[in-house]
Amino acid sequence: MRPIRTFVAAFAAAWLAAGPAFAAPSEVSRAIPGARQVGEARYQVLSVTLFEAELWTQSGAFAWDAPFALSLTYERSARASTLINRSISEMRGRGAGSAQALAPLRAQFQRCFPDVARGDRITGVSTGANTARFYRNGAHLCDIEWPGFRRHFFGIWLAGRDGAAARLSAELRGEA
């Protein structure tokens, strides 16, 4: 009986030492060493899941003034133009500027973002108030620099104001 108890104790210790069950995506680990998941959420429209989202930080807590990574894993295919149009529209609604003022940012998005297929993971790493680096399935896509980018762009997911958007944001920030 003693050898079994010793084996179980050793196995449990090894399992606990291995760390969290869900490791950060490779691009997150490279950008934010020791990244810890803050929260995760599923975005659905009429009970159809569009994407799964995860928020990562070094401390495991969200703060607007610290680097973070947001990963979206798509459950449905989407054209880049749809994602870009929606992002620009949401940013305009958050006070980022008029369509004309955001035209240069739209051009950066068009060079950066591809169509996505089911299972694709797009990760944005907010490296500063005005900068971010983007990855698709772990491969670097582009870097974006734009005044107030962190709050205007990532606020789409992290600063939802009402209903499903507010619930998604709270879950990602680890508040739900």
Image: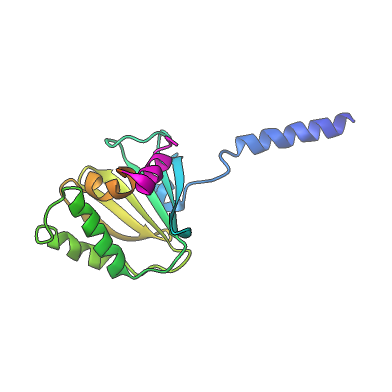
The residue located at (42%, 34%) in the rendering is: 175
Q: Quadrant of the C terminus?
A: top left
In magenta segment, residue 42: no
The residue located at (9%, 61%) in the rendering is: 100
Q: Is residue 15 visible?
A: yes
Q: Main secondary structure of the magenta part?
A: helix
Region rendered in magenta: 162-176
The residue located at (54%, 45%) in the rendering is: 22
Q: Where is residue 160 in the image (x, y as percent from the top left)?
A: 31, 44
Kindly indicate the quadrant of the structure image that contains residue 68: top left
Q: Left or right: 131 with respect to 13? A: left
Determine whether 154 is above or below 120 in the image: above
Kindly indicate the quadrant of the structure image that contains residue 67: top left
The residue located at (44%, 59%) in the rendering is: 46
Q: Can residue 69 be seen in this view?
A: no
Q: In which quarter of the image is the N terminus?
A: top right
Q: Where is residue 101 in the image (x, y as percent from the top left)?
A: 9, 57
Which residue occupies the foreground of this view, 129 or 140?
129
- Residue that protrudes farthest toward the right in the picture: 1
Determine whether 149 is above or below 88 in the image: above
Kindly indicate the quadrant of the structure image that contains residue 107: bottom left
- Residue that protrudes farthest toward the left in the picture: 100
Q: Left or right: 150 with respect to 46? A: left
Which residue occupies the foreground of this view, 58 or 37?
37
Q: Position of residue 30 (x, y in %)?
A: 40, 48
Q: Position of residue 12 (x, y in %)?
A: 70, 34
Q: Left or right: 89 with respect to 20? A: left
Determine whether 119 is above or below 96 in the image: below
